[in-house]
Amino acid sequence: MSRPLNILFVSSEVDPFAKTGGLADVSSALPKAIKDLGHEIRIMMPRYRFIGERKFRLHDIIRLKDIPIPIGSASPIVNVKSSFISNLKEKVQVYFLDNEAYFGRDGIYQNPTTKKDYKDNDERFTFFCRGVLETLKRLGWQPDIIHCNDWQTGLIPAYLKTIYKDDPFFRTVRSVFTIHNMAYQGAFGHESFTKSGLPKELFSTDGVEAYGKFNFLKAALYYADVVTTVSEKYAEEICTSDEYGAGLNGLLASRKKDLHGIVNGIDATLWNPAADEYIFRKYDAKSIEAKDENKKSLLKRFGLEFSDRRPVIGAISRLVDQKGFDLVLEVMEDVLKGDVQFVMLAAGDKESEKKFDQLQKKNAKKMGLVLGYDEELSHLIEAGSDMFLMPSRYEPCGLNQMYSMRYGTVPVVRATGGLDDTVEDYAGSGKGTGFKFEKYDSRELLKAIQRALKVYQQPEEWKKIMRNGMQKDFSWEYSARKYINLYKDLLRP
Ligand code: ADP
Ligand code: GLC
């Protein structure tokens, strides 16, 4: 099929409107890349309160006003607003599903002060999923493909295979579901299932039920026409191990022929050291010495002293079990005994934040810490650090290791998921792009950091590793083509 495809991309986070992690980066960069390849792609997401009307130039769409969405026996209403994300070449239209009661809040999934999940996330995202389908019908724009992402969109494939199955508008529509993280499943009680309006018989293990719960992710994995995840290694891991597959590995293994690993790219316009407005001094592979200026500026931000040949290790992360920062807590004091500095930008649960705060206070001359979310600082850390830590317990893809390599910042990673697929372990003689360790064990992490610190002492060798990373092509085009081929395969009669 050579005609341009119509694709609706559905996500609960899209950069720059709403972001808690990599899902937002992907939900903006991938649609842009697909549009650049000549296809019509549009995005739907919830309109959270903080997506400012003026700041993002949202427009009401008169035609898409007061659309009733069946939730249990009620019919709350959705109003649709619109804006664009733009690229150098093309614009991608974004529709925002607005309902004050569900989305007029300060957080995306949780209350930012208490850090507790909203109690009605089941209803909020049921409303979103059904709202997407009802909005499409009103809009009269018929996609060939609905591309859903993560559990918040998980009911869409189930609706398409049941309630909307015989609707002429949806009869030819195919669904693709991308797993960004198996650990977040959206599992709720039976009462939530009732609100969804899905046929009763779906509450079964041959349907949307997993371990007695109504499970949004399970619904997607069961009903989507095709399932993808964000690296080849993670695709393998989630089928074979209970830990990685988070209890749904059996189902995934049974759908293995429909499961594809497609590695994420990076938005090369936003993450480009030669054009990054957030950093102190722009640079590229030919001017890596300029990195030192960024290092000075970074250390100043953290109130740390700069010294020419002293390595700086950086980290930017959500502080959750997945990211492996318990290993960092175990080894960092040892690491900081050497002539090295550590800067970290992270946010997470209060308990983990407290532990890092204590570590920083004990090592105030060598460690800098910002607890919170800061887009600008994240760019400066990528530009000003020498090494970057990602000791993840699991990592579906991971973006920061790729940002790091592009910025000549050498990643030290655990060999799991996308980290294993995108980083090549240093193999001597100027070969490799980073340092990897296999076993989830703090001694292994320590060894990898020590290995990196040792090579850092050989400046010429180190520069080769930096350049190897900077010269890699992590742009989206290659993976975007893979998605397009997958869409085309699905549409073949
Ligand atoms: P995940 O989505 O699992 O958190 P990724 O590596 O895919 O991991 O993406 C994380 C994204 O979120 C990156 O763009 C990273 O820079 C950003 N990020 C994470 N924590 C912070 C923070 N505290 N401040 C700013 N950006 C952050
Ligand atoms: C998830 C994963 C991360 C991945 C991102 C985008 O948040 O944890 O590894 O890079 O989604 O796909």
Image: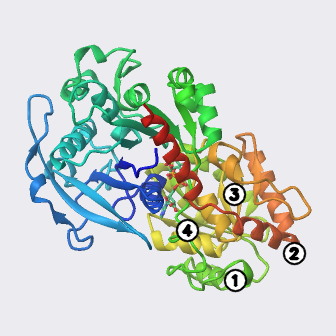
Question: Which residue position holds label 1?
Answer: 292
Question: Which residue position holds label 3?
Answer: 332
Mark 1, Cα crowd under 10 Å, few <14 / some 14-19 / many 20+, is many
Q: Amino acid at mark 2?
A: Glu
Q: Is residue 275 above or below residue 158?
A: below
Whether tag 4 and tag 3 are in contact, CB under 8 A, the answer is no
Look at discs 4 and 2 and give the one toward the viewer.
Answer: 4
Look at discs 2 and 1 and give the one toward the viewer.
Answer: 2
The answer to whether one can see residue 33 in this image is yes
Look at discs 1 and 3 and give the one toward the viewer.
Answer: 1
| Sequence-first tag of 3 and 2 | 3
How far apart, in angstroms, are the residues tagged by discs 2 and 1? Answer: 16 Å
User: Residue 460's mark?
Assistant: 2
Whether tag 4 and tag 2 are in contact, CB under 8 A, the answer is no
| Sequence-first tag of 1 and 4 | 4
* 468 displayed left or right of 23: right
The answer to whether one can see residue 10 in this image is no
| Sequence-first tag of 4 and 2 | 4
User: Residue 268's mark?
Assistant: 4
* Residue lying at 34% horizontally and 41% vertically, measured from the top left: 152
How far apart, in angstroms, are the residues tagged by discs 4 and 2? Answer: 27 Å
